Image: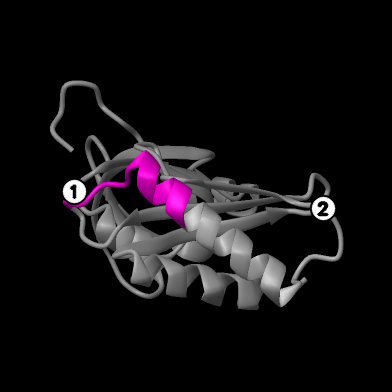
Amino acid sequence: MDLNKITELAKEICERESLKLYDLEYLSGKGILRVYIDGATPEAGVSLDNCAEVSRSLSLELDVENLFTGPYNLEVSSPGLERALKTSEHYTGAKGKKALCVIHSDYTNSLYGGVKKLTGVIESNDEDNVTLKLDNETKVIPYEHIHKAQLIFEYGTKE
């Protein structure tokens, strides 16, 4: 299976539908291909119809291209309010929002005083780092130190 080819097909389909590909993952042990789509602009959302159309189109393309040798399940959805942050583009789109960053254990003692989880507002980012405003300090965290990160939805705040 060629994940790069699948990613390109998904991007093309999303662009055709005035959407963007947010993320894509393949769980090989379960045969599940998960595709996360988002609106083309921060204000645009994703509807159930959008997900259904991307699913139909991508399923057809995957079958035509014969990219899977065995059975697979395709899941297409929005990344959700508490979406994972994996790329520099994800952090850029999340500026001003609250996030949780879990630090790799290799770095927690020496650089973060034993703290494994940092929660704060994303102030800025560049190609190498994200700047997170914590309650009483600001931390510049290299992406390579982050094990995983996600937005934190706060009920009652305007997204």
Please state the extent of the stretch shown in magenta in the rendering: 43-53
Mark 2 residue type = Pro
Point out residue 135 in the picture as x, y percentages from the top left corner. Answer: 23, 35
SS label for mark 1: loop
Residue that mark 1 sits on: 96
Tell me if mark 1 has few (under 14), some (14-19) or many (20+) residues whose alpha carbon lies within 10 angstroms of its own. some
Point out residue 72 in the picture as x, y percentages from the top left corner. Answer: 76, 52
SS label for mark 2: loop
In the rendered image, which quarter contains the C terminus? top left
Q: Which mark is residue 105?
A: none
Residue that sits furthest to the top in the current view:
156
The quadrant where residue 127 appears = bottom left
Q: Earlier in the sequence, mark 1 or mark 2?
A: 2
Q: Is residue 40 above or below residue 34?
A: below
Mark 1 residue type = Gly
In the rendered image, which quarter contains the N terminus? bottom right
Point out residue 84 in the picture as x, y percentages from the top left corner. Answer: 46, 47
Q: Nearer the viewer, residue 39 or 125?
A: 39
Q: Which mark is residue 71?
A: 2
Q: Is residue 6 above or below residue 82?
A: below
